[in-house]
């Protein structure tokens, strides 16, 4: 029976595949913006499971909905109807303003779903010859880790040695409307869609210039390409609006959600679109045993309701301003930290070092000692994304831990 944190770490290292590089902290409990390790030490969670736990750990309303449903009916598969799926589908489509939803479980699955949908729409409705549709994607994208998704990644570590790859993707620079227009023109009549993260998360929280998303949507419309927004990381109030595209009043043709759609309580993802697009999918062409299960439906309705009732978008906006203004003040006189950027409570601090350095990692180790958990996206970038329910006092405490730790590294 493991007792120390090192025992648990040894177990994972011995019996688990080494497909992650975790900080050496073994968590056993969470509540709101706080988590506790197996020794009972308390931490502020400034990662939120990569922006999944927006509503806070173990939110009583989300857990309540999950437990109640788990005691009633957990899985029927889509071989039958279930009494939670229809009401959830009505709720989520009205909430985000789409005709229909296709329920899945994880972010990567939802991205795959969106890609299939865009291709089928291109062949059936737009008349692009079968097997010739292109999907435009961005440099430094992150959309998941399936074979097709890594096929259009330029992260060599994620991609190398996993080929042969799926074709049909064209990568252009992010935040560059000229590049998008050129690609749409160069491949006129063949582009099924443009897949984009409204803010690039894994790339190091890269916020595009104002007007990029609305400009991209307009270009897609002009060229008959679908605008596909991957809001897996940015959606559900994280950036200060329900969706990050709401900052520019853009309605995507296909919307991809995951992570905080369940408040991190359960794997729930979704693809939303209007009838003209969604109706190209017919029985037998896509699905998943767990997608649309009654627990997922009950949890997602609770998670979206909590986000709304607790004004999480407004909280993210206000607390995010506070975070960036405090950190900018520190960065202005720092030699270690170069800049802070982000939107709402999705932020990053860029360290004055190269991408492959271990400085960001070492800073995260020190912050963990001081009771704050965050994770680098690169050797010189640390992402900060606390649950949106974090109290103002805890946010201030977090800011103090971050700046005190950075100060230690000023040398
Ligand atoms: N899209 C984006 C924008 C993401 O940030 C992520 C996860 N970090 C994914 C897709 C993949 O989600 P999942 O890990 O649930 O497959």
Image (cartoon, grey):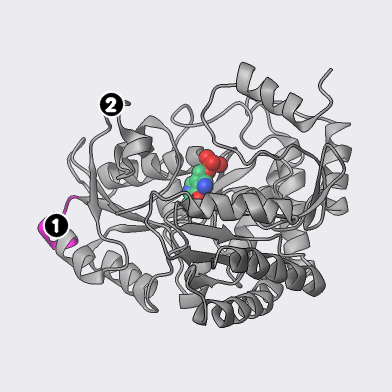
Is residue 125 among the parts visible in the rendering? yes
- What residue is at 50 percent from the left and 37 percent from the top? 109
Quarter holding the N terminus?
top right
Residue placed under numbered mark 2 in the picture: 163
Q: Position of residue 85 (x, y in %)?
A: 70, 42
- Mark 1 = which residue? 188
**Residue 291 horizontal/vertical position (percent):** 61, 34
Is 12 drawn above or below residue 110 in the view shown? above
**Badge 1 local density, few (<14 within 10 Å), some, or many (20+)?**
few
The residues colored magenta run 184-190
Mark 2 surroundings within 10 Å by alpha-carbon count, few (fewer than 14), some (14 through 19), many (20 or more): few
Mark in front: 1 vs 2: 2
Secondary structure at numbered mark 1: loop
- In the picture, residue 167 is in which quadrant? top left
Is ligand 1 less than 8 Å from the beta carbon at label 2?
A: no
Q: Is residue 199 left or right of residue 233?
A: left
Instruction: Looking at the picture, tell me which residue is in the foreground, 51 or 353.
Output: 353
Image-based side of 384 in relation to 256, left or right: right
Q: Position of residue 333 (x, y in %)?
A: 52, 81
């Amino acid at each position: 029976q493991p007792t120390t944190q090192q025992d648990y770490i040894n177990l994972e290292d011995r019996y688990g595949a080494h497909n992650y590089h975790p900080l050496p902290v073994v968590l056993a409990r969470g509540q709101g913006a706080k988590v506790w390790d197996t020794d009972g030490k308390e931490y502020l969670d400034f990662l939120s499971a990569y922006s999944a736990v927006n509503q806070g750990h173990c939110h009583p309303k989300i857990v309540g909905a999950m437990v109640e449903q788990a005691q009633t009916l957990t899985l029927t598969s889509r071989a039958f109807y279930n009494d939670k799926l229809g009401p959830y589908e009505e709720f989520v489509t009205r909430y985000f303003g789409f005709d229909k939803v296709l329920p899945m479980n994880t972010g990567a699955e939802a991205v795959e779903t969106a890609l299939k949908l865009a291709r089928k729409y291109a062949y059936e409705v737009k008349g692009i010859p079968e097997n010739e549709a292109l999907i435009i994607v961005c440099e430094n994208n992150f959309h998941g880790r399936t074979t097709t998704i890594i096929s259009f990644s330029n992260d060599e570590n994620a991609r190398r040695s996993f080929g042969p790859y799926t074709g049909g993707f064209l990568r252009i620079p992010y935040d560059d409307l000229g590049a998008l227009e050129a690609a749409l023109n160069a491949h006129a009549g063949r582009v099924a869609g443009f897949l984009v993260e409204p803010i690039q998360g894994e790339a190091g929280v890269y916020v595009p210039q104002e007007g990029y998303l609305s400009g991209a949507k307009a270009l897609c419309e002009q060229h008959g390409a679908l605008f596909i927004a991957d809001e897996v990381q940015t959606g559900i109030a994280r950036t200060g609006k329900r969706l990050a595209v709401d900052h520019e009043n853009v309605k995507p043709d296909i919307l991809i959600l995951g992570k905080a759609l369940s408040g991190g309580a359960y794997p729930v993802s979704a693809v939303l679109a209007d009838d003209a697009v969604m109706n190209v999918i017919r029985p037998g062409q896509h699905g998943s045993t767990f997608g649309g299960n009654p627990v997922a439906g009950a949890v997602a309705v609770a998670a979206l309701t909590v986000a709304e009732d607790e004004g999480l978008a407004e909280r993210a906006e206000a607390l995010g301003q506070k975070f960036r203004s405090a950190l900018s003040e520190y960065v202005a006189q720092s030699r270690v930290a170069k800049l802070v950027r982000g939107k709402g409570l999705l932020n990053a601090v860029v360290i004055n070092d190269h991408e492959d350095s271990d400085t960001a990692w070492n800073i995260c180790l020190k912050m963990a000692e001081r009771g704050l958990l965050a994770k680098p996206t690169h050797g010189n970038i640390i992402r900060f994304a606390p649950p949106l329910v974090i109290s103002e006092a805890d946010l201030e405490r977090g800011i103090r831990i971050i700046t005190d730790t950075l100060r230690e590294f000023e040398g």
